[in-house]
Amino acid sequence: MRLIKLVSLLLFPLISNARERGLDEKINDFFEPIASFSEDVVLYSISFSDTIKVPIVLLLLVFGALFFTLIFSFINIRKMGLAIQVVRGKYDGIDAHESINDSDHETVNIVDGDIKQTIKSESAEGEVSHFQALATAVSGTVGLGNIAGVAAAIGIGGPGATFWMIISGLLAMSTKFVECTLGVKYRDVSDDGTVYGGPMYYLSKGLSDLGKAKIGKGLGVLFAILCVGASFGGGNAFQSNQATSQIQLFFDLKGGSSGFWIGLFLAALTGVVIIGGIKRIAKVTEKVVPFMAALYVGACLVIIAMNYQFLDDAFIQIISEAFSPTATVGGLVGVLIIGFKRAAFSNEAGAGSAAIAHSAVKTKYPASEGVVAMLEPFIDTVLICTMTALVIVLFNMNDVFVYGGYSSNVILNSTGESIGGVGLTTMAFDSVLPGFSNVLTVAIVLFAFSSMISWSYYGLQSWMFLFGRSKNSDLTYKVLFLVFTVIGAASTLDAVIRFSDAMILALVFPNMLGLLFLYPKVKKELSKYLEAIRSSNK
């Protein structure tokens, strides 16, 4: 709690009247050129027509995911059942290296060149279970984008965007498999059992194995710098800002210093969790993630059930308009890009952030966690994003708003008034039962909180890669992270958040480059793990 008191003492005089004194404007003015430059670089686009532009980063994500899906023979589909079994603990015994004896003689087994009964239990190297690692990673990707972002994508791109969003999510499962397998393979484990892993490690160590040590070190440092920045902004300030806005709306608070106090409360909750490290983060996320997913998906299912008579029409619209969309949404290429973009930005496959959480798993076989990680885009995009999309499509059966009727990505209703993504989803919830949008408020706050605690771990791991693993380094990062939690809640730092969002997308460039070089290592790890499973079933 001393950490929280320190944050409050430092920030209250600075932020409590920030908007009145123009502090927001000064900070935004400073960051605006940086944010604009970052967006121009990261979102540099190729023009297909006067209205259709595709960011290079999106092409890299989609074609990279397609390449991994093909090179691993559709592992995203073939091994879905295995992924569920691993999460449920069916193959935990493979890591245990238990001695095998029968009544007549002792059986000596050789595992990777070692006598099985004498080797150290390598499964002890790790801090969390498969399910905890998955929950932590899911909590980092499931956020406001699943609610506001999807609603905006459907409003702008039409129902057909849902189809391409699902396809992109399925392809992304293969990318997650590759990056999270590498995360475990190249992690560092300290003498006290603390795990340090993620793209910065497999870029530096993995490319070094290929004789590209300098390139690997450079890419690892670049990734770590971008990840720290992304953790402060998109993974923290933006989340606390949106959660605060929802809380203020729910309790009808009129701003003033309420943002500071809500931010301090969020910082206190976050601080209690992140001070305990990945083990405490995992214990929280393994409870929060299933609850928030069940809450949101359950609410969506209620809306779908109450509009069941239109469900077949909704699916017809989604499939037909995926290939024959209206001209207002940019035709086939336009709706495809919108769907792919929403999915890619939602599940973060290719950005490498989730590999940091998955690297802390207790396992001897890196591919076991790669298989588990495939479930993450499925839950985030194929399940939760699709639920949101169905709710929006069903809600618009009575033409409440115009598909593709937008200006600067603002959705317009039938009378020409603008509707934001959250506003659109809120209207859909309340159309079923008055006050049902309160469920949405709870979901948004939970999504924001879970994203913050996961991104704190991603940022901390990157910070320690850059500045060392000392206690002072650990404390410095956590203080800064909690400061940004309060700043995000009490301010409207649009340029800072835009800059940070650009850094999240910029993570794709060093990470995907590393994946394309290192995927043969993943093939070997997969073969080793599947052979271990076959041996255990004999």
Image (cartoon, rainbow, N blue to C red):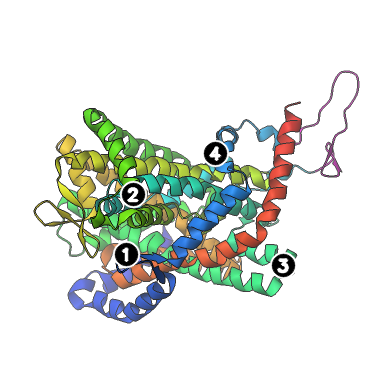
* First in sequence: mark 4 vs mark 2: 4
Secondary structure mainly formed by the magenta segment: loop
In the image, which is nearer the foreground, mark 2 or mark 1? 2
User: 110 or 346: which is nearer to us?
Assistant: 346
Q: For the residues marked 3 and 1, what is the alpha-carbon distance in whole angstroms? A: 39 Å
Q: Does residue 361 appear left or right of residue 123 in this picture?
A: left
Residues rendered magenta in the picture = 96-119
What kind of element bears circle 1? helix
Inspect the magenta stretch and tell me whether residue 149 lies in it: no
* Badge 2: residue crowd in 10 Å (few <14, some 14–19, many ≥20): many
In this view, which residue lies farthest toward the left? 415
Q: To which residue does mark 1 refer?
A: 488
Q: Does residue 45 appear left or right of residue 93 in this picture?
A: left
Q: To which residue does mark 4 refer?
A: 77
Q: Dividing the image into 4 quarters, which one contains the C terminus?
A: top right
Q: Is residue 96 visible?
A: no
* First in sequence: mark 4 vs mark 3: 4
* Badge 4: residue crowd in 10 Å (few <14, some 14–19, many ≥20): some
In this view, which residue lies farthest toward the right? 105
Q: Which mark is residue 161?
A: 2
Position above or below: 500 against 144:
below
Q: To which residue does mark 3 refer?
A: 208
Q: Dividing the image into 4 quarters, which one contains the N terminus?
A: bottom left
Percent coordinates x, y for residue 484 in the rendering:
37, 66
User: 201 or 104: which is nearer to us?
Assistant: 201
